[in-house]
Amino acid sequence: MELKETLALRHIVSCSEVITRWQRSFRKLLGEVTK
């Protein structure tokens, strides 16, 4: 049970990291457009 929980936690963390990276690149794109 612990192993599954840690795997799920790792998956959630990696997903949130990907989302934050995508948000940053999206904001950069928006900044380029608004300039």
Image (tube, rainbow, N blue to C red):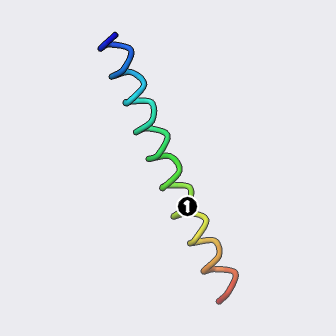
Q: Is residue 14 left or right of residue 32?
A: left
Q: Which residue is mark 1?
A: 23
The mark total stands at 1
- Closest to the observer, 20 or 8: 8
Q: Residue furthest top?
A: 1
The image quarter in which residue 22 lies: bottom right
The image shows residue 33 at horizontal and vertical percentages of 70, 81
Pick the quarter of the image with the N terminus: top left
- The residue carrying pointer 1 sits among few (fewer than 14), some (14 to 19) or many (20 or more) residues within 10 Å by Cα, namely few
The residue type indicated by label 1 comes to Gln
- Closest to the observer, 32 or 17: 17
The image shows residue 30 at horizontal and vertical percentages of 65, 76
The image shows residue 31 at horizontal and vertical percentages of 60, 80
Q: Is residue 17 above or below residue 11?
A: below
Q: Residue furthest front?
A: 1
Q: Assign a secondary structure to mark 1.
A: helix
Q: Is residue 2 left or right of residue 25?
A: left
Q: Residue furthest right?
A: 33
Q: Is residue 26 above or below residue 18?
A: below
Q: Is residue 23 above or below residue 30?
A: above
The image shows residue 14 at horizontal and vertical percentages of 43, 38
Residue name at image x 47 percent, y 46 percent: 16
Residue name at image x 48 percent, y 55 percent: 20
The image quarter in which residue 25 lies: bottom right
Pick the quarter of the image with the C terminus: bottom right
Q: Is residue 32 above or below residue 15?
A: below
